[in-house]
Image: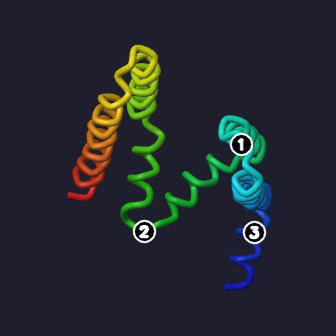
Amino acid sequence: MWQKLKGFFRNYEFALAAWVVIFLLIVIGLRFGLDEHIIGAVVILVGFLGQAFTALIVWIGFVPFVGPVLAKVLALPFIWLINGIGYLASIIAIKRGYSKDVINYQLITFSLLVGITIGYILGKIL
């Protein structure tokens, strides 16, 4: 048991350290009132350099039954494409003054992505 745990920490030491740094950056940044854009950029940079996001997908894949399927869904380019198009449309709509409608459309997009994910998981399990 301890050998497996020791091996896990050895394999994911950079990712675990990156997640600790990300958490601390968010807490400290919000505590001192830093701009959210700066906090977000630094978190993305630390996440990519520390391979934190890839490790998160791997850790989700460790969950029995649902984990591997959920990890596959999160890695689908289609999901990333829909999400990216939604954000681009949101930027254009906010600049034109449709900020209230953007919230509704983002909820619809989120519901669509959750529905696709649940459908994919149920399709693979059943």
Q: Can residue 106 be seen in this view?
A: yes
Q: Which mark is residue 39?
A: 1
Seen from the viewer's position, the closer of residues 84 and 25 is 25
Q: Position of residue 42 (x, y in %)?
A: 75, 40
Distance from the alpha carbon under mark 3 to that under mark 1:
27 Å
- How many numbered badges does the structure rendering display? 3
**Residue 77, above or below 96:** below
Q: What element carries label 1?
A: helix
Kind of residue at disc 2: Pro
Q: Quadrant of residue 13?
A: bottom right
Seen from the viewer's position, the closer of residues 70 and 90 is 90
Distance from the alpha carbon under mark 3 to that under mark 2:
20 Å
Between tags 1 and 2, which lies in front? 1
Quarter in which the C terminus is drawn? bottom left
For marks 1 and 2 on the same chain, the one whose residue lies earlier in the sequence? 1
The residue carrying mark 3 is: 9
Q: Where is residue 81 in the image (x, y as percent from the top left)?
A: 42, 26
Kind of residue at disc 3: Phe
Quarter in which the N terminus is drawn? bottom right
For marks 3 and 1 on the same chain, the one whose residue lies earlier in the sequence? 3
Judge the density around disc 1: few (<14), some (14-19), many (≥20) Cα neighbours within 10 Å: some
Q: Position of residue 41 (x, y in %)?
A: 71, 36
Q: In which quarter of the image is residue 37?
A: top right
Q: What element carries label 2?
A: loop
Disc 3 + disc 1, Cβ < 8 Å: no
Disc 1 + disc 2, Cβ < 8 Å: no
Q: In which quarter of the image is residue 107?
A: top left
The residue carrying mark 2 is: 64
Seen from the viewer's position, the closer of residues 1 and 52 is 52
Q: Which mark is residue 104?
A: none
Q: What element carries label 3?
A: helix
For marks 3 and 2 on the same chain, the one whose residue lies earlier in the sequence? 3
